[in-house]
Image (cartoon, grey):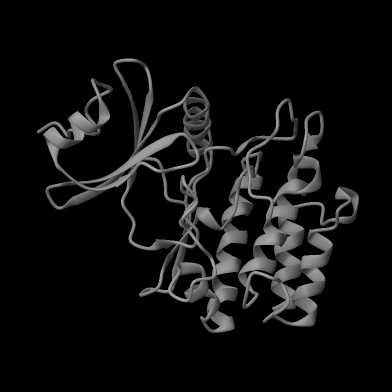
Amino acid sequence: MPHPLFDVDVIDTVAAHLASVGTVFRVFDQQDSGCESYGVAIGPERWFVKTALTAGAVQSLERAKVLHAAVKHPAIISLRHALTTADGVPVLVYPWVDGELLYHATVPRTATRTQPDSPMARFRRLPVAAVEVAIARVLDAHLAVESAGFVAVDFYDGCLLYDFERGQVRLVDFDEYRPGPFVSTEQLSGSRRFMAPEEYGVGHPIDIRTTVFTLGRAARLLLDAGDEENAWRGTAAQLDVVRRATDPDPAGRYPSVRALADSWRQAC
């Protein structure tokens, strides 16, 4: 029997097609990315379906297709199928994975990192060892990104899906990752809390040291008790690793994700 998501390449409209083949149980329609996504149940299966509402989002989803064709890792939620609407807009199908985004960028801005019941605040109350496991998994996933010749763009806490019951982190939303190194020709997307200095403006080289900076910022923010970065929960050795990873001068950073991951492992 044909699968209504995998055995079709073109559909009329996403919402109508999903409603005709299953039950839509979640709609994510307040994104700042120009995308719209759905959680849909088809029999016992649950899927996450993502499409684009703007020209910029179309480019992003096309980039995601390229990334997922090249990068595979257990922590990275993999793309299962890509189709298009009759207008040529990409539609990406991922497995639905239980968990909570540590930060959910919405329009208007309604998400928070500091409310006690927010996913990020709850994550920061986990034992340090549990946070270290999550950071190690993020680094390991980016070893696969590095090995495939890609660099991280627009990685931030909104890319981290954490299952509090299982104590497991998964990575999502690789729409801006791209082969590197490259020189920026437009202002790159990203969170100011995670972006390297060279990601601002245009005409700057973006390479694996940029990814190292972003991952260093991730470790700094995840292993802190609050948003002001004055409540470090890790060790002095770990903080030294973060400081080198986030050197404003790319030449002062670790030369690769592998070097960063090795130093972080030793510090732990």
Horizontal and vertical percent position of residue 253: 84, 56
Q: Nearer the viewer, residue 170 or 203?
A: 203
Could you say which quadrant of the image residue 216 lies in?
Answer: bottom right
Q: Residue at x 74, y 45 (%)?
A: 208
Q: Nearer the viewer, residue 9 or 161?
A: 161
Instruction: Report whether 65 appears left or right of 233.
Output: left
Q: Residue at x 68, y 56 (%)?
A: 193
Q: What is the number of callouts on the image?
A: 0
Q: Nearer the viewer, residue 78 or 98?
A: 98
Indicate whether 203 appears above or below 137: above
Horizontal and vertical percent position of residue 76: 47, 52
Q: Quadrant of the C terminus?
A: bottom right
Indicate whether 101 appears above or below 173: below
Q: Residue at x 64, y 74 (%)?
A: 223
Horizontal and vertical percent position of residue 133: 55, 73
Q: Residue at x 60, y 75 (%)?
A: 132
Q: Quadrant of the N terminus?
A: top left
Horizontal and vertical percent position of residue 2: 14, 31
Indicate whether 54 appears above or below 166: above
Name the residue at the left extreme.
1
